[in-house]
Image (cartoon, grey):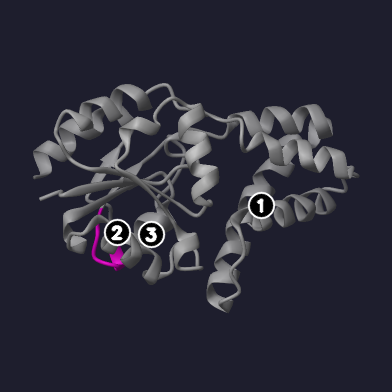
Amino acid sequence: MNAAVAFDIYGTLIDTQAVLTRLSELVGDKAPAVSQLWRQKQLEYSFRRGLMGDYCDFSVCTRQALLFACRQQQVDISAAAVEQAMQAYAELNAFTDVPAGLQALQQQGIPLYAFSNGSRAAVQHLLKRAGIADSFTGVISVEDVRSFKPDPKVYQHLVNSCGVTANEVCLVSSNSFDILGAAHAGLRTAWLRRDPQTIFDPWDIQPDILLDDFSALASQLSAAN
């Protein structure tokens, strides 16, 4: 039974496409390559810091990853342009299927939580800007335990914050590493495949629910209970 549902934010509820648009304005034709490497290194840096026990705000990982991506792609980016690219992360909108999907879940009476590597302030700002902040019972950030997904203590913090047992929490995420981390910690999982070309990691763990459309989540969760 699902007593609480938690959602990853960036790429799951919030569309990061605007970041690529801003990059295109700043670095031109190399924007797609820079954007892809930026995201890859952003996660890698958070993984490293989690393993090292060297926590910092996720925005630090994001900034350092952008600098790496630009240098790797031989893009000369100014300090002002870096700030403009970083600001794009604060100006993102929700995917179009999210408001109605969250409303359907609210009608089931299940507490909903935003759960992110980002700071609580950054996530609250995004949710408010996207007009979906009132859908959530609370915002749970890794900053409280000073580590990053997929550290098991991050998921335990989520469970503790929800006030239920691990197998009563369902994590919804578009990131397979997040799904694997949550499943390893005993949570139920729903993988949202935003990009039909994305392949789930070939581990011996599979998500409990596979979604191609966020609007189908409410019915699939109800069927799984």
Q: Which mark is residue 161?
A: 2
- Extreme residue toward the bottom, this view: 52
Dot 1 or dot 2: first in sequence order is 1
Q: Nearer the viewer, residue 163 or 88?
A: 163
The residue identified by callout 1 is 62
Residue pictured at 31% horizontal, 32% vertical: 135
Mark 1: which secondary structure?
helix
Where residue 33 appears, x then y in whole percent? 72, 41
Tell me the amino acid under the disc marked 2: Ser
Label 1 to label 2: alpha-carbon separation: 26 Å
Q: In front: 205, or 10?
A: 10
Q: Is residue 109 visible?
A: yes
The amino acid beneath tag 1 is Thr
How crowded pointer 3 is (Cα within 10 Å; few <14, some 14-19, many 20+) is rated as few
SS state under label 2: helix
Residue shown at 16%/31% (left/top)?
219
Q: Which mark lies nearer to you, 3 or 1?
A: 1
Residue 115 at x, y percent in the picture = 39, 50
Q: Residue at x 69, y 37 (%)?
A: 87
Q: Quadrant of residue 60?
A: bottom right
Q: Is residue 218 left or right of residue 198?
A: left
Question: Residue 95 lies in what quarter of the image?
Answer: top left
Please name the residue that numbered disc 3 is placed on: 202
